[in-house]
Amino acid sequence: MVKSPLFLKLARTIKSTLGPFLAIVAVVAVGLAVFVAMTAVSDNLVRSREAFYRETDFADLFFHVVRAPEAILERVSAVNGVIRATGRIQKDVSLFREDGTRATLRLTSFQVPMEKELNRLRVQKGRLFEKNPEGGVLEILLSPQFAETNGLRPGSTVSVAAEGKEKPMEVVGIAASPEFVYVIKDAASVFEEPSSFGAAMISQEQAQQVLDMAGSINQVLVSLAPGIDESRAREEIRSILEPYGNLADYPQKDQVSEAILRGELEQLKVSSTYLPAFFLGLAALMQAVFLGRLVKAARTQIGLMKALGFDNGRLMLLYGGYSLASSATGALAGILAGYGLAGLFIQLYAAYFNLPRLTAGFNFRAAGMGLALSLSLGVASGLMATRQVLSIHPAESMRPPIPARTRPLLLERWGLLWNRLDLSWRMSLRSMSRNRFRSAVTFLGILVSIGMLVVSLFTRDSMDSLFDRHFNLELRYDLLARFSSPVREMELMNLERLDGVTLVEPLFELPVRLYYRGRREDVLFVGILPGQSLFGMIDANDRPRGLPASGVLLDWNAARKLGAAPGDTLEVETLLGKGPSRRASIVVAGLSRKSVGSASYLDIGELNALLRESNLVTGAAIRVEPGKAEGVEKETADMINISSVLSREREERYLDENLAYLYVSIGILVFFSILLGLAIVFNASALTFSERRRELASLRVIGFSREEVALFLLKENLLLLLAGTLVGLPFGRLLSEGYARAVSTDLFTFVAVVFPRTYLLASIGGAIFVALAFILGLRGLDRLDFAETIKARD
Amino acid sequence: MVENQALWRLENVTKTYMMGQVQVTALRETSMEIHGGELLVILGPSGSGKTTLLNLLGGMDKPTGGRVFFDGESLEGANEKRLTAYRRDVVGFVFQFFNLIPDLTAVENVALGAHLSRNPLSPPAVLEEVGMADRMNHFPSQMSGGEQQRVSIARAVVKNPRLLLCDEPTGSLDCSTGRVILELLEKVNRTYGTTVVIVSHNAAIGGMGMRVATMSSGRIVNWVAHPAPVPPGEIEW
């Protein structure tokens, strides 16, 4: 095959400018890798989620009541728009582990056969429970992570405390459920280890028997016909369930597992939009700048080719082909890398989310979109840069080069300063201003690179500060024991007696519904002792504060949703689930802001008064002597009315061990940021060098040393690098805040915290870029044959 | 005033290059002496080795064989640092394509040269000397070729060098502008006593040299001495 001379020329041009070509390829590749990976992961998650929800008929509305007869389902089903309603029992029970510690199981019941029910299970291992197993054995299925972290499998037997009695249950299978895609007790429990909380599924009949709920249910799930007014149906069902103690009701989007999954998807969407946009945009600018220089340097050659008869179109194709080639190479590399990266991310997600169909695969949509995007950017930047080809006149191009057109700067009018600048600075400033577009791209590239370095490191800072606040300011206890139902405060003496316990403080956690000016909001009231020392409260301005003498320190998010402020009086309805529901009013004494989840604090006496009770507690915060927490926890195993014990030590350990996924993503981002910075610096240096090689050669010839000339060369980029770094730091801060806002949900407020350490590390990144620019300059000078360059025409 | 003793001396100098995969001998066993204060013209067609000779004299290149002496000292063993110092302190260059720094004005370009010297002349004074007093604050892009070459001469002269090497200084200029430049070079030689070596393929220029060497195929094939050189203003080509 005879190759066209233009094609050969293109191939040789690429070969002779391989460094800058590869730098552009790298930036395109990173942009596309991130785009393809994130889009593939996000597509994959969305698809698996939708398929799973459809396949298992995930409910649209959830209602929690104290206890209702099963027959109530007929009335709920009759509500306009309701397609299907399922009644079930869900209750948290304790599981005793062999080492004496306990875990919490959310026991959920299912009708057998299951076909017509909502939130069906998908059995992954073993089998489904039977309706009436032989010998009355209690059969359960477990969620995968819980089974795995506790070493349980089909055939294992576990010991569970329900209604004050310890009962053996047989694990017959492992199953995934749409409401336990992410298994978590509640929004406040994000730091709890997966081995301490799991989902257990049991048949309706056995649940009713174990939990003393014969003929009754405590939850109603509903699916609605499309296009139905959800809030109206919700209101109607709520009034049907009102007599049975309506504890909570929420739509699918507020179901905790779905809310966390959706938050994750939104985070992915943010990353898959902004990162690739930065990289591809910068790659296009780099292409335009580099091609522009290439065309300028090849002025004589282009003129010659025109003289030989090549037309503008073909010449533009030649140079435009350069950017198309770099885009296409980058796109292919990016798609391949993105495919690998997607596999890594899917693996990470699969460890946290139980989505049965979540497997890595090649995503043609993401690859196709990425390819189209980068090629069109390549064409656009190619066209932009090769417009100059049109204005090259064959005869003119053969004449000696005209010196670059320089104009005095505005700064020069400021003689006092200008006259103090030495000649090398004057040269650099004028050259920067003469090559404004190129300077802007270098500045922008460094700005983005440094900004991204700050963003990639800030997640770690924010997490550190979140943990610090959570573990050192807000929670000062070693163990938190919760009872299965309220007990007299005197019972805490049993805890005080345990070996190693130094302090026990009572706690009453009461779910309540607040009403204010027609709005309502369910929150958790936490009653504690005035003068207690194991809970730290932090106000909306992040300042520590004490418990008010009267009234409630309301969660700031609940206050925002209610539109209530300190001084306002709210109506409270208690939602304890035991005993009658009470109504009273309470004053907002102040606002509290918890790092994870939410809590509204008040005096435990005042809380008891809301229930018209006294001296009741639902739990205890315990401080123990160093090293004795585990022993104390084991001793509580005998106390059957304790439903769960949280250990701060275990939570901290779990977090330390499980931040791997965070470090992986930080590592990848840091790598990409540095790669971008290096590519930008490399190209800027190559461009400055190629454009100024003639003057550099003259400087060498007239007697400047290699180092002096390298400094001349560096100065131009130094200013841009310094400015890019300086502006990049606050830009990173802004990006971090935007990112934090984008990923914050109602469940979890992510506050952007950037430690000085991060700014320092990012600045070191900037310094590395400067050093690299200098080294590249020196290397170029070593290779520069100045005697030859000086004689050449251009 | 021409000194009696040779300040530069070449002994059997050979220079070979690799041009791609072909070895080219640019200079073959050439010997010559240059006296302080003389104005020497080296003539020859392109490829005859005159630029190579100039590069060796200017410390831009090292010979493959033979030795180059300056003031009795051999430049042969000099490292890059010493050669840089030699270029800085001893030599001034004037090129065919002027090679001014585009981002510096005329006076700034000259000041750049002055910056290198231990006893520089005053940049504005030198610019005045070359007839560029009224264009001091112009950038190269605002000057004609002849004006750029005058600034380039000023940049070389301001260092107060002992040797001024001029490689085809009129190569990019029309005849009358070229003549002005040659007059200027002769004036530098006369006023400051600077040794001036002019390399050209234009035989007419030979007339202004006190001595004229003609080169061909890497060798000096002819020497002519002019006891009374022709003033540059009278040269025609």
Image (cartoon, helix red, strand yellow):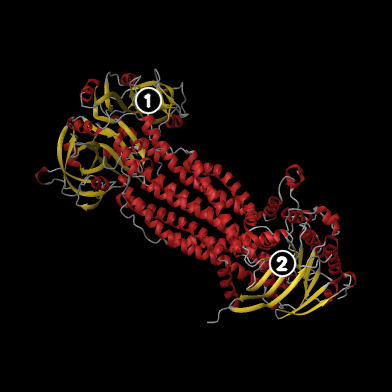
Q: Residues within 10 Å of mark 1 (few under 14, many from 20)?
A: many
Q: Residue furthest left?
A: A135
Say which chain tag 1 marks: A
Q: Mark on residue A356?
A: none
Q: Is residue A279 left or right of residue A618?
A: right
Residue A201 pos. (x, y %): 23, 44
Q: Residue shown at 46%/21% (left/top)?
A: A567
Q: Between residues A120 and A657, which one lies in front from this camera angle?
A: A657
- In the depicted view, which residue is nearer to us: A294 or B138? B138
Q: From the viewer's perspective, is residue A19 above or below residue A656? A: below
Name the spot of residue A676 as percent of width and height, x first: 52, 54
The numbered disc on residue A391 is 2
Q: Is residue A706 above or below residue A224?
A: below
The type of residue carrying mark 2 is Ser
Given residues A357 and B18, the one toward you in this image is B18
Q: Nearer the viewer, mark 2 or mark 1?
A: 2
